[in-house]
Image: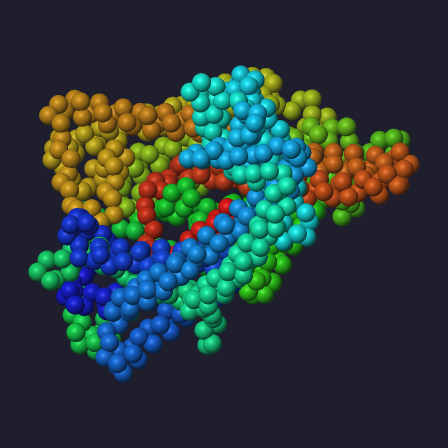
């Protein structure tokens, strides 16, 4: 990465960023300017956001009217087309390109005001229509229970308080949500102290009636409350407050029963008039929206989408310009650029200056080491490598020029997954899914399946390794395959080896799956295999620490961390792996005299008679060798602990260069890293108490060493999840097959087996191919993040994200679509 300072004249800012933003070359570093007080582009940024809010309101109205909006399939093509249109307009009409935002703002604001007025009228008509329809249905429902000889009188100067004339009772009626009806009943009982009568009825809505669609979609009940108000009208107010808290909709009754039919007829007449007015208002609203919704004849995109993309483009430009520092009409900012892109940037700048003589722009290269800023990390990714890099970046972005775990994850991630998920059938299905996604990439992408397609190579490689490990385990949906014959024959109710030199070409002989020792044998193999794989994986991580130390010339870390750590791991767990292999290649007969690998490892300083693996029968040679390994491991512990803090303390005491390797290590591990684009900071001042300095460094190093030593044990044990999940996967497949199909066949019930096969298929897909696949994926993720990457990986970098108008517009459009989808769900 290269670090430059960019200087522009104030008049050149918009044109320069508009052209560079289409090239995806530079990442502007935000200055420390007070955004709200000193930056002149704050008003334009707020203007863009204001217009986007207006467009969102218009789109929400379109959704309410079920008006389809045609989206833009290719944002980059639109950006280029817009740029060409603005260039032609500037030449022909002499209108500057940057004035487009003001034109769009005026057009959208004017039309949005008219649309909002019509939409409010349309909404008011809908509310009135709903209220009339509900009043009609309430009266029809109550008509069946109201006494015919009672007069219902409205009390003047009150809201929805009605009196049953001649009896001294008051009543309230209306509707309430069904889910709140019985809560209202209990609350009214407590509030009125049994002095109010409540009757609940289902709101009757005649199917096919013109009033059927005028009610809310939520189910509602009709309430009818009768009560006698006490002194001071306290009860009446309590009932009114209670109904208000339940969001009840109250209705009035006609003055007498014989007036109900007349009222219903009046409601029908008013309802028809409202329907006519609503249709007319809808037509006006749809007509006013055509400016935003009718697709362009050439691009086939709705104007509202093009306007939103145009404003999003302007917002992206002004947001980048807001990062500049402005002094005396000169804009300045620092930026990052990939070294290979520098010639392209220079060529683009020359072209921009040639096409527009008003543009004045210059760049000046600077040293980011002297500026004390941390460079971003940039990787050129392909469809194959991008998913693996995403796995690494989710934990932490690699530091600038740090060894990237993503390169090794391409091989190790699918392999470790395959060890856990190994099955010929399940791995073959996953492999087939990955192959189909690769083969049908173009047609599936055209149908909008892009999210899944991004991981097609990851799924393919996971399926490939699962298929291979399934061949090694000789496991197909819980059934062993006899692919290469067998080295055993059945004689006298026993399996005898055909020939001592017979070797099964790949994986396990199918005869082993019929032996009584099957589970113990497979457990032993998978457990020891997981240990070997885990130790190799961790030692690769330690080796990468050496690569980082050599590249950054950090010789202290190389000689006093990598070397003792590598030797410590080799003489402890590395020796365990060698012992496992030695035990595998020797013939131990019936196995009664086979030594225990765990005993060998626990008694590394001595050899018991039961743990003699190699050398003489008494274990003298093995004991001497293992004692030597124990001493080496002990020495490595102190080499990791003492030299590094002493060297660093001496460097500080005798005035070593602040930027030497040892001091850089302290800065990396003790001090917080500099943030991107931060101002230069002075080195941390040493404490006056040198003993305190040394103790602080020593304590820090002791924590690191203890974490490594204890972590090597826990990390190795953590790789046993390879064995546990592989065993669980195989046993689940076998149990599902036995319980649903094989037991039915053995029991002589083929019909039950046929019925059980769909159950077996469902268990295989939903439990093994989905749930267990996700479980194995997450455990593989943990092995890479914790057990592998903690040996060498800092992961405190940040990505190189050059200014790209098209990508910014796509983000804005995606956010708008998500917001629209949320509104639709509500």
Question: In the displayed structure, would residue 118 be above or below residue 188?
Answer: below
For this orientation, the residue located farthest to the right is 748
Task: Describe residue 323's horizontal placement relative to residue 813 as left or right.
Answer: left
The image quarter in which residue 652 lies = top left
Task: Describe residue 816's horizontal placement relative to residue 271 as left or right.
Answer: left
Question: In the displayed structure, would residue 710 be above or below residue 429?
Answer: above
Res. 398 in view: yes
For this orientation, the residue located farthest to the bottom is 92
For this orientation, the residue located farthest to the front is 166
At 57% from the left edge and 40% from the top edge, which residue is drawn? 254
The image quarter in which residue 633 lies = top left
Question: x, y percentage for residue 18?
Answer: 28, 67
At 62% from the left edge and 43% from the top edge, which residue is drawn? 260
Question: x, y percentage for residue 547?
Answer: 35, 45
Question: x, y percentage for residue 638?
Answer: 32, 25
Quarter holding the N terminus? bottom left
At 43% from the left edge and 28% from the top edge, which residue is drawn? 711
Task: Describe residue 740's horizontal placement relative to residue 283 as left or right.
Answer: right
The image quarter in which residue 477 lies = top right
Question: In the displayed structure, would residue 76 be above or below residue 574?
Answer: below
Task: Describe residue 735's horizontal placement relative to residue 604 as left or right.
Answer: right
Observer-nearest of 810 and 382: 810
At 18% from the left edge and 68% from the top edge, which residue is drawn? 12
Question: x, y percentage for residue 498?
Answer: 81, 39
Res. 730 in view: no
For this orientation, the residue located farthest to the left is 328
């Amino acid at each position: 990465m290269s670090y430059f300072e960019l200087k522009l004249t104030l008049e050149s800012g918009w044109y320069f960023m508009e052209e560079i933003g289409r090239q995806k070359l530079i990442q502007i570093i935000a200055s420390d300017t007070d955004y709200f007080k000193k930056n002149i582009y704050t008003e334009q940024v707020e203007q863009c956001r204001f217009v986007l809010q207006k467009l969102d309101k218009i789109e929400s109205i379109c959704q309410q009217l079920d008006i389809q909006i045609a989206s833009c399939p290719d944002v980059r093509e639109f950006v280029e087309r817009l740029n060409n249109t603005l260039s032609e307009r500037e030449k022909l009409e002499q209108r500057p390109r940057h004035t487009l935002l003001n034109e769009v703002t005026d057009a959208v604001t004017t039309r949005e005001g008219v649309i909002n007025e019509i939409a409010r009228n349309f909404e008011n008509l809908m509310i009135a229509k709903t209220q009339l329809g509900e009043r009609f249905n309430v009266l029809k429902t109550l008509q069946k229970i109201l006494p015919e000889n009672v007069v219902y009188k409205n009390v003047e100067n009150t809201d929805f308080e009605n009196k049953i004339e001649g009896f001294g009772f008051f009543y309230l009626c209306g509707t309430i949500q069904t889910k709140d009806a019985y809560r209202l009943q209990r609350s009214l009982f407590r509030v009125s102290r049994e002095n109010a009568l409540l009757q609940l009825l289902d709101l009757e809505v005649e199917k096919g009636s013109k009033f059927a669609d005028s009610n809310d979609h939520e189910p509602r009940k009709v309430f009818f409350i009768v009560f006698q108000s006490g002194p001071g009208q306290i009860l009446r107010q309590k009932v009114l407050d209670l109904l208000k808290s339940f969001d009840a909709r109250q209705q009035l009754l006609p003055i007498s029963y014989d007036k109900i039919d007349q009222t219903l007829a009046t409601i029908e007449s008013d309802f028809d008039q409202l329907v006519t007015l609503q249709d007319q208002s809808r037509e006006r609203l749809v007509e006013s929206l055509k400016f935003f919704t009718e697709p362009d004849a050439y691009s086939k995109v709705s104007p509202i989408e093009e306007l939103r993309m145009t404003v999003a483009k302007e917002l992206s430009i002004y947001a980048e310009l807001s990062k500049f520092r402005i002094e005396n009409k000169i804009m300045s900012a620092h930026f990052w650029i990939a070294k290979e892109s520098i010639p392209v940037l220079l060529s683009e700048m020359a072209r921009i200056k040639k096409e527009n003589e008003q543009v004045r722009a210059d760049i000046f290269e600077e040293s980011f080491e002297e500026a004390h800023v941390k460079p971003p990390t940039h990787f050129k990714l392909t469809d194959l490598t991008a998913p693996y890099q995403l796995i690494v970046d989710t934990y932490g972005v690699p530091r600038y020029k740090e060894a990237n775990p993503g390169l090794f994850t391409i091989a190790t991630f699918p392999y470790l997954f395959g060890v856990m998920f190994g099955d010929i059938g399940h791995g073959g299905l996953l492999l087939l899914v990955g192959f189909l996604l690769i083969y049908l990439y173009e047609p599936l992408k055209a149908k909008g399946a892009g999210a899944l397609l991004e991981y097609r190579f990851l799924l393919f490689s996971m399926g490939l390794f699962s298929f291979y490990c399934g061949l090694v385990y000789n496991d197909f949906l819980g059934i062993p395959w006899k692919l290469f014959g067998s080295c055993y024959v059945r004689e006298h109710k026993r399996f005898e080896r055909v020939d001592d030199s017979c070797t099964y070409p790949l994986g396990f002989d199918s005869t082993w799956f019929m032996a009584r020792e099957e589970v113990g044998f497979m457990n032993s193999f998978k457990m020891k295999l997981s240990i070997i794989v885990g130790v190799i994986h961790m030692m690769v991580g330690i080796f990468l620490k050496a690569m980082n130390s050599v590249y950054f010339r950090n010789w202290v870390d190389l000689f006093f961390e990598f070397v003792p750590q590598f030797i410590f791991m080799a003489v402890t767990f590395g020796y365990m792996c060698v012992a496992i292999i030695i035990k595998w290649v020797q013939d131990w007969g019936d196995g009664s005299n086979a030594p225990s690998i765990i005993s060998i490892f626990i008694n590394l300083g001595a050899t018991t008679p039961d743990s003699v693996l190699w050398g003489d029968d008494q274990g003298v040679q093995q004991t001497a060798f293992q004692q030597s390994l124990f001493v080496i491991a002990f020495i490595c512990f102190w080499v990791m602990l003492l030299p590094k803090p002493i060297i660093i303390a001496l460097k500080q005491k005798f005035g070593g260069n602040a930027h030497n390797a040892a001091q850089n290590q302290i800065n990396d591990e003790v001090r917080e890293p500099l943030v991107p684009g931060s101002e230069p900071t002075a080195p941390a001042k040493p404490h006056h108490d040198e003993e305190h300095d040394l103790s602080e460094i020593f304590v820090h190093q002791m924590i690191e060493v203890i974490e490594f030593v204890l972590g090597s044990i826990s990390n190795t044990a953590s790789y046993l999840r390879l064995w546990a999940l592989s065993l669980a996967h195989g046993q689940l497949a076998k149990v599902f097959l036995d319980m649903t199909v094989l037991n039915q066949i053995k029991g002589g019930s083929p019909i039950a087996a046929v019925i059980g096969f769909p159950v077996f298929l469902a268990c295989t897909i939903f439990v093994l191919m989905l749930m267990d696949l996700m479980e194995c994926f997450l455990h593989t993720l943990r092995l890479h993040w914790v057990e592998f990457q903690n040996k060498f990986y800092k992961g405190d970098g940040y990505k190189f994200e050059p200014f790209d108008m098209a990508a910014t517009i796509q983000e804005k459009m995606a956010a708008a679509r998500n917001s629209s989808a949320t509104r639709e769900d509500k």
